Amino acid sequence: MSALPKRILKETERLMADSPPGISAAPKDDNLRHFDVTVAGPESSPYEGGVFKLELFLPEEYPMNPPKVRFLTKIYHPNIDKLGRICLDILKDKWSPALQIRTVLLSIQALLGAPNPDDPLANDVAQNWKENQSAAIAQAREWTRQYAQ
Amino acid sequence: MSSDGDNDDFVYDDEYEYDDGFDQDEEADEIDSTSEPDVYDALSPAIEEAPQKKPYDVTWKVKTLQEIIDMQNKEIKKIQSVLEVPPSSAAVLLRHYAWNSEKLQEQFWNDPATALQEAGLSPPSSPTTSTQPLPSGPFECPVCCMDYDAASLEKNTYAMGCGHRFCKDCWTEYLTGKIKAEGESGNIQCMEDGCSRIVREEVIDEMVAADVFKKYHNLLNAAFVADSPNLRWCPHPDCQYIIECNQAPTRMLDQLVPTVECKCGNELCFGCGHPASHRPVLCRVVKMWEKKCADDSETANWLQANTKECGKCNSTIEKNGGCNHMTCKKCKWEFCWVCMGPWSEHGTSWYQCNRFDEKSGVDARDTQAKSRASLDRYLHYFNRWANHEHSAKLDAEFYKKTEKKMEQMQNSGNLSWIEVQFAKQAVDVVIKARITLKWSYCMAFYLKRNNMTELFEDNQRDLERAVENLGYLLEQNIIDTDSIAKLRSDITNQAAYVQKRHDILMDDTLKGYLERRWEFAIPT
């Protein structure tokens, strides 16, 4: 494995020293491009009170290509599928090399606070979200209690 | 299909305007397509009386890549002088407005600042490159986190008018990745998150290697052709030409089959890019047919040959061994595989069904027949279509065989080279007619059953017979000089007849679209 680029070292350093509220990210011992991440559910969202585990991987081309991020904790959300994959524009075509791990994780946290059922990844969840929002939110709350606490 | 009065008299003339975004003034009168290729012009100037243009034919021009580049440059120059912007900005503006210069000018004069900004350019007051003073202290590139001291900033970093500064190494890596890996060209934006400033050509030239810059230009040209509804790349392998046709916009494709011929010698459909003529069938019908064939034909053939449907629940059943006493796995219905009637009526005559005419058996087969009818109908047309498709694929061999025969005729029949050309011409006619026949079966599959369709199928049958006869004549062996003379006149006559039948089918079908005579059993 080649030496870690300065950018990744600096980002890791800053993340460890001063992580955004409700977010933690630490590289694994055996692979410094592979991060264990936790994100706290935002207040007044159905995910409030839950702590969600994610994994984040910085590919060889980072920061020219976006990091790969996935939820490990089961979550009921229209833009996150069964496998934990996330539908978020900055992780795909809207990626900019000026974005960072920190900004990506903040965007994911924001996505929990503002689900977008019109751009769904998990079709069944999105449909439920649109047709019967209160039931969907109750379900999300239930899953948070069951899997993220 | 609704008919709005304008289209009833379908005539293409100079009044027919289709705004293609280009200056047509100087070009309006040259028409490439109706004249013969250069070789003929040189050899026989008498051919000037080009075949009369039919109302369903389109005119087109074949362009080289250089001409396409010139077209862009001409537009860029025009916009550059009208709007008084640098050439690279004119190019960015034109690309943003998909080369619609009228729309661009309208928007620009309405509000220049917004037009520039929306296209990803600096507002008119600010320059294209950042004029903000260079940072006085050391600078850390936000992308790679490398440090640059104040003295090397000018040389090693760069910021566009938006002021987002990055080191040149990162710019190079970023731009190379966008161009080579993602195939982007005209809309590569600043590296900063959320900044929509477009990276202009001269910046890209400065930052990337020569081969990447070349690829950038190829992508720009490809995007230009893709953005222009009146341009299309020739789809044939290794062909670099571009076809320009102003008469086949998408909305006309319900009435027109715009077959054109590229300078590489191959035909294509300008409407959908199909790499051969698919006349007389409309583009969208071809698309539907090809999708259906890709999905269904193999499976359908196999089902047809190997399975029957359960008389009760219609499950498809394959009998892969054992006796004729079948029990449907799904609904437990017991029946005879031979007569499809209920097994209970078979008594003890196992293994040997002699009940084919019994009523219950006939009924069971009737239901089955119904469920098979649509499949059979499809296979009927598909097999004829596929048969001609297959024959057309063998045309190289057909030519070879005919050439041999032509040699033979020259040797044994004392005919000159010119005198035996009739055979090759006949093969040309057969091949052309087979392609038309092939598509005519696709057409017939989708046509509603009515009188018009019957006329269509009459024409189709006449052509089919004529082609078969000609094919038969071309297969004849040459015995002696007398028979050669007779064969020659037979083939020539039959070829002329096939050509005539072909033209009738084509002419009638294509005119039928303009006259809205055809009714399709598909959603329009």
Image: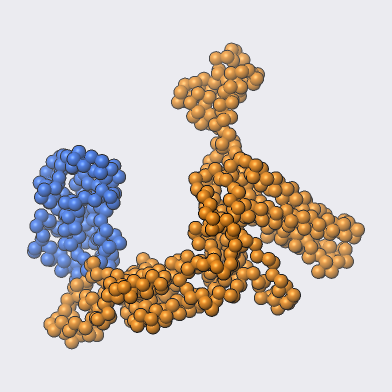
Chain colours: A blue, B orange
Given the current orientation, which residue lies at the most extreme front position?
B5
**Residue B57 image position (x, y, % from top left):** 61, 62
Location of residue B69 with respect to B460 vertically, above or below:
below
- Residue B303 versus residue B377: which sits nearer the camera? B377
Location of residue B418 with respect to A57 vertically, above or below:
below
Question: Which residue is painted at 19% across and 72% down in the image?
Answer: B142
**Residue B188 image position (x, y, % from top left):** 32, 70
- Residue A4 versus residue A51: which sits nearer the camera? A51
Label tally: 0
Q: Residue A143: in sight, yes or no?
A: no
Along the horizontal axis of the image, is B354 left or right of B269? Answer: right
Question: Which residue is painted at 48% across and 79% down in the image?
Answer: B70
Given the current orientation, which residue lies at the most extreme top position?
B347
Location of residue B70 with respect to B250 vertically, above or below:
below
- Residue B323 versus residue B359: which sits nearer the camera? B359
Question: Which residue is painted at 52% across and 44% down in the image?
Answer: B522
Along the horizontal axis of the image, is B218 left or right of A21? Answer: right
Residue B396 appears in which quarter of the rendering?
Answer: bottom right
Along the horizontal axis of the image, is B327 left or right of B95? Answer: right
Residue B339 appears in which quarter of the rendering?
Answer: top right
Question: Which residue is painted at 55% across and 17% down in the image?
Answer: B343
**Residue A81 image position (x, y, % from top left):** 27, 47
Q: Residue A1: in sight, yes or no?
A: yes
**Residue B257 image position (x, y, % from top left):** 58, 58
Given the current orientation, which residue lies at the most extreme bottom position?
B151
